[in-house]
Image (spheres, rainbow, N blue to C red):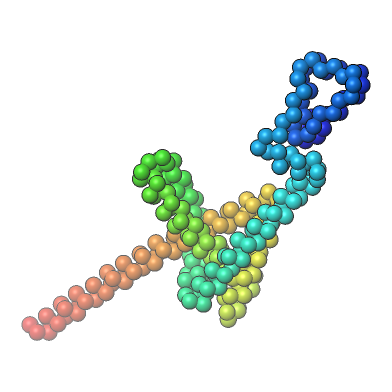
């Protein structure tokens, strides 16, 4: 029996082993067991005990409530970080959401590419001295970028729901609530949450690259303008 007790009444006969996983074996007098009476608890004894006490669905319900509590704490941390960012750098998250809005395919592509690159780094450097240095640093960077990405995609969703708001903070908080509710939907919600997070993650990466490209373009234009002014000045002198 798995997750239950084995009860053998008088005169019962078991040709092989009598085994109870996560339970006990009760036998009356006159019971014949061909093998041994084995009781298994093991490392998953708590899980099996939970199944016995609450039943399958009751046990799953308690796991769900525990996950919901953990997700709620996580989204609370996300909200605090997002509000602080909006107060200190109000245009930072908005630039990322604009990138997601204008280049959604590129955002999801960079999100997948970033995750794959991280997994390849872990696989190729795990167990080495280089890996012991790069993996923790990369994990920290990945986590920070992911937090920014979740805030960005939450703001993006909030902007789509609440339009024409002077302050983006209510939009951000509404988007975070929506993300939290989506994550609580069994099975399907987790998948949607991951996809949306990839959009945000890729949006952060894409936005950073775009900002760097704009900065370089501005530098080139500034250099060209300076050269043109020098040439004009030379022509005037001549």
Position of 47 relative to 61 (above/below): above
User: What residue is at 65 percent from the left and 66 percent from the top?
Assistant: 177
| Residue 147 seen in the current view | yes
Q: Could you say where residue 9 lies in the image, as x and y percent from the top left?
A: 91, 24
Relative image position of residue 234 (x, y in whole percent): 11, 80
**Towards the viewer: 158 or 33:** 33
Q: Residue furthest front?
A: 29
Quadrant placement of the C terminus? bottom left
Placement of the N terminus among the 4 image quadrants: top right
Q: Position of residue 215 (x, y in %)?
A: 34, 69
Which of 236/62 is in front?
A: 62
Note whether residue 109 is visible: no
Please state if 214 lies on the left or on the right of 104 as rendered.
left
Determine the residue located farthest toward the right in the rendered image: 10
Residue lying at the far bottom of the rendered structure: 236
User: Which residue sits at x=85%, y=28%?
Assistant: 26
Task: Give the side of residue 166 with respect to residue 96, left or right.
Answer: right
Which is nearer the eye, 152 or 142? 142
Which quadrant of the figure has residue 38? top right
The residue at the point 67 percent across, 54 percent down is 67
Task: Determine whether, in the image, residue 232 is placed left or right of residue 173.
Answer: left
Q: Residue at x 57, y 76 (%)?
A: 168
Residue 42 vs 55, above or below: the answer is above
* Front-most of residues 156 and 133: 133
Number of marks present in the image shown: 0
**41 vs 19: above or below:** below
Quarter of the figure with residue 39 = top right
Q: Position of residue 81 (x, y in %)?
A: 54, 68
């Amino acid at each position: 029996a798995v997750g239950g007790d084995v009860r053998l009444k008088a005169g019962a006969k078991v040709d092989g082993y009598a085994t109870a996983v996560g339970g006990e074996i009760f036998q009356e007098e006159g019971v014949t067991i061909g093998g041994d009476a084995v009781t298994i608890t093991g490392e998953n004894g708590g899980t099996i005990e939970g199944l016995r006490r609450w039943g399958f669905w009751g046990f799953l319900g308690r796991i769900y409530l525990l996950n919901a509590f953990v997700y709620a704490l996580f989204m609370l941390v996300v909200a605090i970080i997002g509000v602080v960012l909006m107060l200190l750098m109000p245009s930072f998250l908005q630039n990322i959401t604009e990138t997601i809005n204008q280049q959604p395919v590129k955002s999801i592509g960079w999100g997948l590419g970033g995750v794959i690159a991280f997994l390849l780094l872990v696989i190729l450097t795990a167990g080495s001295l280089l890996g012991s240095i790069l993996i923790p640093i990369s994990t920290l960077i990945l986590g920070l970028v992911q937090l920014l990405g979740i805030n960005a995609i939450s703001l993006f969703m909030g902007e789509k729901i609440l339009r024409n708001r002077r302050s983006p903070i209510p939009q951000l908080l509404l988007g975070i609530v929506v993300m939290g509710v989506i994550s609580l939907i069994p099975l399907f919600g987790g998948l949607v949450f991951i996809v949306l997070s990839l959009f945000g993650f890729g949006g952060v990466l894409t936005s950073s690259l775009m900002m760097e490209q704009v900065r370089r373009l501005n530098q080139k234009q500034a250099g060209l303008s300076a050269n043109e002014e020098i040439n004009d000045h030379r022509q005037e002198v001549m």
